[in-house]
Image (cartoon, helix red, strand yellow):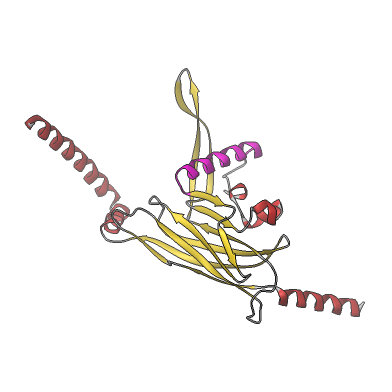
């Protein structure tokens, strides 16, 4: 019995030693949103090494998940009644990511099973949105699919099954586009190394998206002086309407 236990411990020790090490990096750790910001592209790259620093001796698949700040959201479903579109059913999600992009070296369903993909959120089909309260599974799936479709059309959710390139079993890279309508805050870029359907290593890099210049001043004013900001916005709208009317009358 003691020999069997020692053999088992040795087996797991050797297995752990064989797991690779990921050395991830991103092209920009700070993204500044200025006036006229049209979006940018992040390069996520790195190396797959053995624990002793040598190049990896096995083939690995790589999956990169870039996730933006989470936020609560109320999703409403519209129905047409007597020719008029009205709000019908709705549901609340406690933690929907404002941005979610997945890039992989092969399609997700070819490199891991559904259970593993769900644990690590490897793909839009496995996004965990944490609904508030109890909800029917079929209804949750319908609302989740609706949110994913909406944000895909906005450029905020995306999935590229061949978006990661691996060179000589060592270097990998992926490019993920951030559109102009991204939310500010801290983003996490998590990289997973997968071998024979098992996640054998993972690593995280952070990216900060922040407003600077005039946009930052406006955002700070809106956050700290919300009532005054609202009054100013209404007054500016009234003034611009009055000015447009005066100009049109002079033409």
Residue 234, image x and y in percent?
23, 41
Which quarter of the image is occupied by the N terminus?
A: bottom right
Residue 117, image x and y in percent?
66, 54
Q: Residue furthest bottom?
A: 52
Q: Quadrant of residue 136?
A: top right
Residue 64, image x and y in percent?
57, 60
Question: Would you say 215 lies left or right of 245 here?
Answer: right
Residue 17, image x and y in percent?
72, 77
Q: Residue furthest top?
A: 82
Q: Residue at x 62, y 70 (%)?
A: 168
Decide which of 181, 221 is in the foreground and name it: 181
Decide which of 69, 125 is in the foreground and name it: 125
Question: Would you say 7 lies left or right of 55 here?
Answer: right
Report the predominant secondary structure element of the magenta stretch.
Answer: helix
Please say if 89 is above or below 171: above
Please say if 51 is above or below 165: below
Q: Residue furthest front?
A: 168
Please say if 140 is above or below 97: above
Residue 243 lies in magenta, yes or no? no
Residues drawn in magenta: 135-156
């Amino acid at each position: 019995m003691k020999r069997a236990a020692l053999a088992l411990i040795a087996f797991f020790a050797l297995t752990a030693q064989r797991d690779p090490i990921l050395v991830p990096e991103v092209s920009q750790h700070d993204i500044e949103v200025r006036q006229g910001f049209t979006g940018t592209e992040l390069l996520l790259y790195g190396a797959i090494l053995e624990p002793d620093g040598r190049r990896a001796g096995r083939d690995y698949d790589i999956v990169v998940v870039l996730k933006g700040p989470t936020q609560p959201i109320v999703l409403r479903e519209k129905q047409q009644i007597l020719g008029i579109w009205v709000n019908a059913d709705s549901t609340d999600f406690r933690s929907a990511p404002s941005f979610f992009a997945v890039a992989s070296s092969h399609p997700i369903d070819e490199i891991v099973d559904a259970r593993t993909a769900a644990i690590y959120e490897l793909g839009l089909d496995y996004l965990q949105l944490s609904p508030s309260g109890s909800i029917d599974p079929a209804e949750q799936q319908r609302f989740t699919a609706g949110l994913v479709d909406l944000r895909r059309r906005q450029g905020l959710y995306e999935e590229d099954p061949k978006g990661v390139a691996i060179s000589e079993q060592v270097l990998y890279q992926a490019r993920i586009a951030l559109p102009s309508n991204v939310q500010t805050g801290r983003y996490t870029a998590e990289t997973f190394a997968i071998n024979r359907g098992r996640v054998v290593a993972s690593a995280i890099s952070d990216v900060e998206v922040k407003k600077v210049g005039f946009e930052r001043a406006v955002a700070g004013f809106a956050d700290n002086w919300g009532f005054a900001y609202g009054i100013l916005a209404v007054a500016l709208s009234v003034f611009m309407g009055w000015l447009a009317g005066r100009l049109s009358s002079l033409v």
